[in-house]
């Protein structure tokens, strides 16, 4: 049992429940025998907690003010001078602290039998750790709540009060009427006044009071009275470690010296649990809004580990000087600012700057790339003026390095880099860079021009600007084609063929995206053009013996994905076997390899998809993280498959079609809905609210909920989504047609089965 409990405290463990009930019953009997059923204007109702010195009752106040409160009254038979002093101390401590995150005192007095009591608001909550777990609060939300709890502790310190028993059970998580959560620091029963002039600190007070698992080393030493604000900082550090990692502090109680008390960092705790029970570790990660314990471990490494390490230093002088300083460092994590607990190297500071200002950094990179493109053109022009063949060869190599560097930078300007911010300015800057490239195209080395154009075009496609990408690629394609035709029979043919193939792959991507925006014969035509672009890339690579290049794998995967073959008259099974061999040689760090494997599962029957897609997708997520754009799309497709399989299961049954009874069907749809909600959040973060991928994630999440809950429950949300798609994509967009078809199925009900046929 904790040393002293306040309203809303933890209950006894199941192992000691009988003894605890007997003790509480005895206290109630004692209260009844002593006739103490009222404390001032409050009628005691029932016991809600017990500590070392007091019992906490739920009570009601009658009269002009009617309300429910918590009344804490000293236990019978404990009215020694020392205990009375401690109880009075808690009264005075609470009365002095006025802060939204500290449980305030409403009233105080003396019972008829001479026992002191005081009344506080009746808080409905639970410990900060279990409360956050139950509410499934994200890691960021937990850090924000913890910082506010530190604010409450700091308010006590300002008034000269050290809590001395901070632990999760003494920081309640209380839900507000609007659904928000707030921490409440409670139970100052063994607090020590820093201001000794108040006369409430006895010189003989040398007992180890508190909860050993959260006590600072100086509190645990025999005969020590060294607890100060930094002791509370230590306890807060242990609470923070448990809050973010989900691993409770060790429950040892023996006093030890600082040198014998190593502190386990949050990431170390997660790693230890992962090795023993991966399921439990993954569950803790999911409670924090993360998919796996490995992702949680990576998030804790660095800033959060450093904060906990500093807060829990054995030497008090090395800790944060105050709980306010601890809260400030936690908020720096939330704001992507450098934390004081870590060494502020140039690389670390620069990384945090980029995280805080992703949009501005993206714009700066685009501007830098434009400048570098002009510099590359000037470099090539200077190379051609070189009289020395050796100098020209070195210069071309330098120009190629510049072009590759620019391409690697542009590869980062995609939906993931923008982090959901308005992409219109970046799109305009990319278009301006494309225009500058066209102006300098005649003087640029074709290899450099192709690499820069490929990077700009892919960035434009990811930002849903395939038309602009296609225009640029066609112009650069013509320039590189002429250069390649002139180089036939020379040693330059290989490099020019490779870059021309790179352009053709990008052209195919742009055409495929244009196909998604089209309808009717135009849609079919663009599909054929895209496939032809990829086939052309394979022909170029094959003619120069470069079919082992990763670009060949990308081209072949695209053709195979469209259920076509290369060459067109090739047997598809033979082509598929060749593509599989190409993909097997790709490293696991290549997302194309995962996409190919997922697509092979997607063309299976529904039973095969439902069985094999989730574990493969889990591997993809572990490799690249939930925020990777291709992972988000695959997660969205999983929800789409789950809903579609459920609908088809109600139309007919045959080989490969799942069978659900009513209960299993509802459970299946609810599972799809639970998967869909975090995908919407990830899509908004990665792509922004008006991107097609975000709209599609919302659509299938609504579809799962609509089939499970009925059209009345989701009709309003479907209408809002319809209006947003119409405003962003137009009334004739393919996405809007997809929404209308989905709504038709939801509105008619799943029992209609294949309503679209």
Image (cartoon, rainbow, N blue to C red):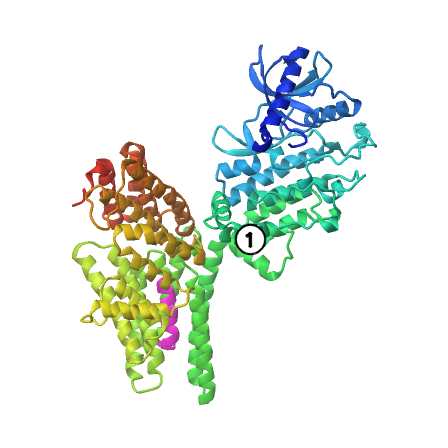
- Residue at figure coordinates x 55%, y 55% from the top left: 353
Q: Is 440 placed above or below 112 here?
A: below
- Residue at figure coordinates x 59%, y 38% from the top left: 148
- Residue at figure coordinates x 75%, y 47% from the top left: 257
User: Along the horizontal axis of the image, is 48 left or right of 755?
Assistant: right
Tell me if mark 1 has few (under 14), some (14-19) or many (20+) residues whose alpha carbon lies within 10 angstroms of its own: some
Q: Toward which corner of the image does residue 97 lie, by quadrant? A: top right
User: Along the horizontal axis of the image, is 376 left or right of 244?
Assistant: left
What residue did someone put label 1 on? 271
Return the residue nearer the eye: 342 or 310.
310
Return the residue nearer the eye: 19 or 629.
19
For the N terminus, the quadrant is top right
Q: Toward which corner of the image does residue 593 lie, by quadrant? A: bottom left
Q: Residue furthest bottom?
A: 388
Q: Is residue 449 magenta?
A: yes
User: Along the horizontal axis of the image, is 560 left or right of 38?
Assistant: left
Counting the numbered discs, the total is 1
- Residue at figure coordinates x 27%, y 60% from the top left: 512
Q: Is residue 498 magenta?
A: no
User: Along the horizontal axis of the image, is 651 left or right of 246?
Assistant: left
Q: Position of residue 648 (x, y in %)?
A: 22, 45
**In this view of the protein, can residue 194 be seen by the observer?**
yes
SS at badge 1? helix
Give the residues in magenta: 442-458
Q: Is 369 placed above or below 245 here?
A: below
**In this view of the protein, can residue 706 be seen by the observer?**
no
For the C terminus, the quadrant is top left
Q: Toward which corner of the image does residue 123 lie, by quadrant? A: top right
Return the residue nearer the eye: 179 or 23.
23
Majority secondary structure in the magenta region: helix
């Amino acid at each position: 049992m904790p040393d002293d409990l306040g309203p809303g405290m933890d209950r006894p463990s199941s192992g000691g429940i009988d003894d605890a009930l007997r003790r509480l019953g005895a206290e109630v009997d004692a209260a009844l025998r002593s006739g103490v059923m009222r404390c001032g204007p409050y009628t005691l109702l029932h016991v809600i907690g017990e500590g070392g010195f007091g019992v906490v009752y739920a009570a009601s106040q009658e009269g002009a003010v009617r309300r429910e409160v918590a009344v804490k009254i000293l236990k019978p038979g404990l009215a020694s001078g020392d205990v009375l002093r401690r109880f009075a101390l808690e009264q005075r401590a609470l009365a002095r602290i006025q802060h939204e995150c500290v449980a305030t005192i409403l009233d105080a007095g003396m019972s008829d039998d001479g026992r002191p009591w005081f009344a506080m608001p009746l808080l409905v909550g639970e410990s900060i750790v279990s409360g956050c777990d139950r509410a499934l609060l994200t890691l960021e939300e937990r850090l924000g709540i913890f910082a506010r709890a530190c604010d409450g502790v700091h308010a006590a310190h300002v008034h000269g009060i050290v809590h001395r028993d901070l632990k999760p059970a003494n920081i309640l998580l209380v839900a507000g009427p609007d659904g928000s959560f707030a921490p409440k620091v409670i139970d100052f029963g063994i607090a020590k006044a820093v201001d000794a002039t108040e006369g409430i600190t006895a010189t003989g007070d040398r007992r180890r009071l508190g909860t050993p698992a959260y006590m600072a080393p100086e509190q645990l030493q025999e005969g020590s009275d060294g607890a100060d604000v930094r002791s509370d900082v230590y306890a807060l550090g242990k609470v923070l470690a448990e809050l973010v990692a989900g691993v409770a502090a060790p429950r040892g109680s023996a006093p030890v010296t600082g040198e014998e008390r190593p502190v386990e960092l949050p990431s170390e705790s997660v790693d230890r649990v992962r090795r023993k029970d991966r399921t439990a570790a993954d569950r803790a990660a999911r409670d924090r809004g993360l998919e796996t314990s490995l992702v949680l471990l990576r998030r804790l490494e660095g800033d959060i580990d450093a904060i906990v390490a500093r807060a829990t230093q054995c030497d008090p002088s090395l800790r944060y000087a105050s709980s306010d300083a601890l809260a400030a460092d936690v908020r720096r994590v939330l704001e992507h600012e450098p934390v004081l607990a870590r060494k502020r190297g140039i690389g670390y500071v620069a990384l945090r700057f980029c995280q805080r200002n992703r949009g501005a950094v993206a714009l700066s990179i685009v501007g830098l790339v434009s400048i570098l493109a002009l510099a590359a053109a000037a470099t090539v022009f200077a190379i051609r003026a070189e009289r020395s063949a050796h100098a020209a060869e070195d210069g071309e190599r330098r120009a190629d390095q510049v072009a590759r560097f620019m391409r690697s930078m542009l590869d980062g300007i995609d939906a993931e880099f923008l982090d959901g911010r308005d992409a219109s300015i970046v799109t305009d800057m990319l278009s301006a860079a494309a225009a500058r490239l066209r102006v300098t195209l005649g003087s640029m080395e074709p290899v450099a021009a192709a690499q820069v154009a490929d990077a700009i075009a892919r960035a434009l496609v990811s930002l849903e600007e395939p038309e602009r990408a296609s225009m640029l690629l066609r112009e650069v394609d013509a320039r590189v084609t002429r250069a390649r035709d002139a180089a036939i029979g020379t040693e330059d043919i290989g490099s020019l063929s490779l870059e021309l193939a790179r352009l053709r792959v990008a052209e195919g991507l742009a055409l495929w995206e244009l196909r998604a925006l089209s309808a009717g014969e135009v849609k079919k035509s663009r599909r054929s053009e895209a496939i032809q672009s990829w086939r052309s890339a394979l022909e170029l690579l094959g003619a120069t013996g470069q079919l082992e290049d990763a670009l060949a794998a990308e081209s072949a995967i695209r053709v195979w994905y469209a259920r076509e073959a290369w060459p067109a008259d090739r047997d598809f099974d033979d082509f598929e076997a060749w593509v599989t061999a190409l993909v097997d040689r790709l490293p696991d760090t290549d997302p194309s390899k995962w996409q190919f494997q997922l697509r092979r599962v997607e063309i299976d029957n529904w039973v095969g998809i439902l069985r094999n897609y989730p574990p493969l997708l889990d591997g993809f997520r572990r490799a690249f993280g939930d925020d990777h754009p291709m992972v988000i799309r695959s997660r969205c497709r999983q929800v789409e498959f789950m809903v579609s399989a459920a609908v088809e299961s109600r139309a007919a049954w045959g080989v490969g079609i799942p069978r659900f009874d009513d209960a299993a069907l509802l459970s299946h749809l609810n599972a799809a809905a639970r998967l869909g909600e975090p995908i919407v959040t990830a899509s908004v973060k990665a792509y922004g609210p008006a991107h097609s991928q975000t709209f599609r994630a919302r659509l299938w999440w609504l579809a799962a909920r609509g089939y499970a809950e009925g059209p009345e429950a989701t009709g309003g949300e479907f209408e809002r989504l319809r209006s947003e798609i119409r405003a962003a994509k137009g009334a004739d967009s393919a996405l809007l047609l997809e929404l209308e078809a989905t709504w038709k199925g939801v509105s008619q009900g799943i029992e209609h089965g294949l309503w679209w046929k």
